Amino acid sequence: MKKKSIVTLSILILLAVFVAACGGNNANKGPSAKPQESASPESGAEQPASEETSGTVTYESETGPVEIPAKPARIVALTNAPNVLSLGQSLVGVDQWTGANPLFTDMLKDVAIVSEEDPEGVAAQNPDLIIAGSHMKNLDQLSKIAPTVVYTWGKLNYLDQQLEIGKLLNKTSDAEKWVNDFKTRATAIGQEIKAKHGDNVSVTFFEMGDNSVFTMGDSWARGTEIIYQAMGLTMPEIVKKDTAEVGYYSLSLEVLPEYSGDFIIVSRDLSRDNDILTSEVWKNIPAVQKNQVIEIESKASSYSDPTTLEYLLNIFEQGFLGQGQ
């Protein structure tokens, strides 16, 4: 029997990396909060911070103007770290969820794991810029340590968020170039998928824990933005309906066939077996019988930054078309 998840956002975030990622980011066992999604920027969207390369500039953040370094060199990212890293910017402090993400391990060697719960630990990194979430604690204390720019989860869609980080870091042109290129490539792959499998080929995402399954809408990381937004593939109507309110929906094993599309993408811990995948209910789903299931590692799929999206785009191209880079 279907049941709606009442897991709070904070619990979702804590579960992010270890059970499903954001993760994801990380996310899961009640899929974690999508790292970045939704509307377009209401502030900071019109003007880059500056094209200057030294001194300070005024960044128009969602909470008002913030004086920041024109070229920040010691950034602590308590949120949006993958977006920063994807622009080639190094960090001196990072949140534990990004630190545990296998896509960023090499980039984060010797980078301190920090938390808004411990402002002293943040201060010890001598940051010149702090990036934080609006839901986080101790924002006033953090802002006394270094200029602090706050983002609200869900305020920007996944591409606008990358553009905004580009403005913050004085790397607008790099962010724009990637966004335009990604949209072109993802759209083209989506067209190839439709040509091979039909214009209305449907796709369902399942996030699997040990004893839980969630399905997700079009902006909950794990590649949902790629499949539904960039590629324009079809979401089953029942999934669309039941994820409309909060972006994901908790399911029981027996109803999985009702939610399954022509293809299924499963986000789970690939290092462990999952009993759901050996159940008779699962084995009798048409997509499973046709070998049209694509599995992704939850710990590496919980964000919607360029590094993660490129990683997943390659997996999806291989899974749907049997090819990839």
Image: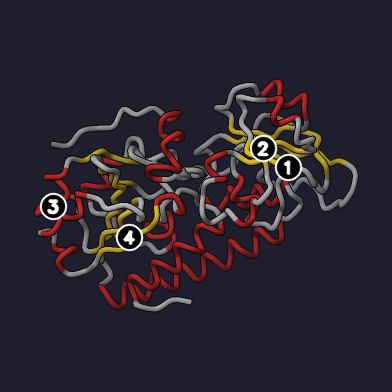
Judge by depth and name the residue closer to the eye, 68 or 127: 127
What's the residue at 50%, 59% (across, down)? 309
Q: Residue furthest right?
A: 55
Give whichever of discs 1 and 2 has the lower sequence position. 1
- Mark toward the start of the polypeptide (2 vs 4): 2
> Which residue matches tag 4?
295
Dot 3 or dot 1: first in sequence order is 1
Camera-near label (3 vs 1) is 3
The location of residue 69, given as percent across then percent down, is 82, 42
Q: Residues within 10 Å of mark 4 (few under 14, many from 20)?
A: some
Do the numbered discs 1 and 2 sit on residues whose CB atoms are within 8 Å? yes
Task: Kindly state the secondary structure of the residue where label 3 is placed.
Answer: loop
First in sequence: mark 3 vs mark 4:
3
Q: Do the residues under discs 3 and 4 have CB atoms within 8 angstroms? A: no
Marks 3/4: CA–CA distance: 17 Å
Q: Measure the C-alpha gap from mark 1 to mark 4.
A: 34 Å
Residue at the image position 14 percent from the left and 50 percent from the top: 258
Give how far apart the Cα atoms at labels 3 and 1 are. Answer: 47 Å
Residue 75: mark in rendering: 1
Check the image and report above or below for 211 versus 314: above
Q: Is residue 178 left or right of residue 252?
A: right
Q: CA distance from mark 1 to mark 2?
A: 8 Å
Which residue in the protein does label 3 denote? 279
x and y percent of residue 93 in the render? 68, 40
What residue is pinned by disc 2?
131
Q: Amino acid at mark 4?
A: Glu
The residue carrying pointer 3 sits among few (fewer than 14), some (14 to 19) or many (20 or more) residues within 10 Å by Cα, namely few
Residue 184 placement (x, y as % from top left): 52, 69
The quadrant of the image that shows the N terminus is top left
